[in-house]
């Protein structure tokens, strides 16, 4: 089954509104003729409407980096799925390891967030990944298994057609140390078999599984050559328009 590759930029807590608009304008101009890759930028919440307006009618779409699991209410400082949709978001990143590590997000919260995203009409990008200690202890598959089964508990395959899974080994994020092609291949194969076991063969074939963690122009071709890799979630290297464009325009003739 052919899955449309996706290259997504997670801008984390970088760039003011004007800076985000500037970079988004450069990326969308450089990629205006790209038709075979889904391009997504996730800026800070306050920049979402600005970036959405900037990339309107270009191949670039916009995503948020987080959302709250309630539809509305007295939750000071939080943001809902409806608000993100109204701001122009199509995707939302859920359960990023930085949210899990610094903001104590649990698999149960992640599951509620996926539900809120889907009910609100957002496409969730569920992030999972093991820490260095978990890998060293041989607990990589166990960790991923728990994150997938608890994070997606209670959903049926028909609800998850738009789900994107992002494998981001925590030890590879922002370290310059990407996972090896062999490590990525092994995990992505495992994830697809997990999805098949938990849901269905068809869903497992339809879902895009992205890799994230020190992706750069120098390693994107090798990563995209791996059968079960359908794209990348890029942090640091997505902040610069030229570098991000090089990743988006990876060599897909291989
Ligand atoms: P880096 O590409 O900076 O390692 O970050 C990856 C990431 O966390 C994307 O969500």
Image: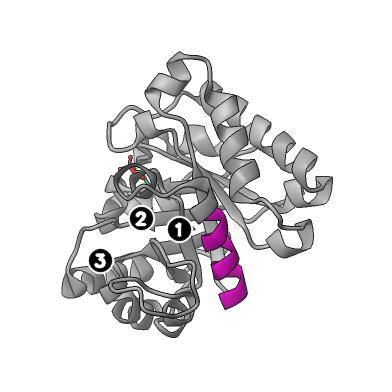
Residue hosting label 3: 23
Picture quadrant of residue 124: bottom right
Q: Residue at x 65, y 36 (%)?
A: 191
Name the N-terminal-most of marks 2 and 3. Answer: 2
Q: Position of residue 153 (x, y in %)?
A: 67, 51
Viewer-side residue, 27 vs 107: 107
Mark 3 vs mark 1, CA separation in Å: 20 Å
Magenta span: predominant SS is helix
Q: Mark 3 touching mark 1, by CB under 8 A? A: no
Q: Is residue 121 left or right of residue 161?
A: left
Label 1: element kind? strand
Q: Is residue 133 above or below residue 118?
A: above
Q: Residue at x 33, y 48 (%)?
A: 235
Residue hosting label 2: 10
Neighbours of disc 2 within 10 Å: few (<14), some (14-19), many (20+): many
How many labels were placed on the picture? 3
Magenta segment boundaries in residue numbering:
110-120
């Amino acid at each position: 089954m052919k899955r449309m590759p996706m290259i997504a930029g997670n801008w984390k807590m970088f760039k003011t509104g004007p800076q985000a608009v500037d970079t988004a304008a450069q990326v969308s101009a450089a990629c205006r003729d790209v038709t075979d890759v889904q391009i997504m930028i996730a800026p800070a919440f306050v920049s979402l409407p600005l970036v959405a307006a900037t990339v309107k009618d270009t191949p670039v779409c916009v995503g948020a980096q987080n959302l709250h699991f309630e539809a509305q209410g007295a939750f000071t400082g939080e943001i809902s799925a409806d608000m993100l949709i109204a701001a122009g978001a199509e995707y939302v990143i859920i359960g990023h390891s930085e949210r899990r590590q610094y903001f104590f997000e649990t698999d149960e919260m992640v599951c509620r967030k996926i539900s809120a995203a889907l009910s609100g009409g957002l496409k969730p990008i569920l992030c999972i990944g093991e820490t260095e200690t978990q890998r060293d202890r041989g607990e990589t598959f166990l960790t991923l298994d728990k994150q997938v089964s608890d994070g997606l508990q209670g959903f049926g395959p028909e609800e998850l057609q738009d789900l994107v899974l992002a494998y981001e080994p925590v030890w590879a994020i922002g370290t310059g140390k990407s996972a090896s092609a062999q490590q990525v291949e092994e995990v992505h194969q495992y994830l697809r078999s997990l999805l098949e076991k938990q849901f269905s063969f068809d869903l497992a074939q339809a879902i895009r599984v992205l890799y994230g963690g020190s992706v750069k122009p120098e390693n994107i071709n090798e990563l995209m050559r791996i059968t079960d890799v359908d794209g990348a979630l890029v942090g640091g290297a997505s902040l610069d328009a030229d570098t991000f464009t090089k990743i988006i325009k990876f060599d897909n003739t291989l």
